[in-house]
Image (cartoon, grey):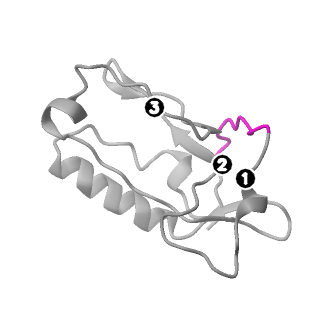
Amino acid sequence: MELTADIPVQKIKQSRLSEVDFNQLEFGKYIADHMLVCDYAKGSWKTPQIVPYANLSLSPSALALHYGQTVFEGMKAFVTDDGKANIFRLAKHYDRFAKSLDRMCMPQVSDEAQYFRES
């Protein structure tokens, strides 16, 4: 599946990719150079962005801190020979994410968004 949406990307200045030992990958040892962030405000999700990996800033009143109300969905991405970014089984990730949001009584991300379309 190819990512078909134009998500703004803010590239990191110095990649850590050269530090990865691809012959001996360990679970949880390597962190991606980038992360996707998307704000939710006034009843709707805003434009997602891919930004350099960094710590998150949370309000002390965040529901995640008070009630443990969080959802996380990791994705595996790769670059094809033609330089395009692809995400493995993106639609399946969306389905799991949507199910988790429903269980947690959190607002859904529209599946109509171009981000989840198969090409």
Label number found at residue 56: 3
Write down the residue under mark 2.
33
Please tell me how crowded label 1 is: few (under 14), some (14-19), or many (20+) other residues with Cα within 10 Å: few
Q: Position of residue 58 (x, y in %)?
A: 36, 25
| Quadrant assignment, res 96 | bottom left
Q: Secondary structure at mark 3?
A: loop
Magenta region, mostly helix, strand or loop? Answer: loop
Please tell me how crowded label 3 is: few (under 14), some (14-19), or many (20+) other residues with Cα within 10 Å: few
- Which residue sits at x=22%, y=20%? 61
Q: Which residues are magenta?
A: 5-13
Tag 2 near tag 1, CB within 8 Å? yes
Q: Earlier in the sequence, mark 3 or mark 2?
A: 2
Query: Nearer the viewer's eye, disc 2 or disc 1?
Result: 1
Tag 3 near tag 2, CB within 8 Å? no
Report, in whole angstroms, how far the alpha carbon at label 3 lies from the one at label 2. 14 Å
Q: Secondary structure at mark 1?
A: loop
87 left or right of 92 in image: right
Query: Of the residues shown, which amino acid type is indicated by label 2?
Result: Asp
Up-down relation of residue 98 to residue 92 (above or below): above
Report, in whole angstroms, how far the alpha carbon at label 2 lies from the one at label 1. 7 Å
Write down the residue under mark 1.
16
**Nearest to the observer: residue 37 or residue 116:** 37
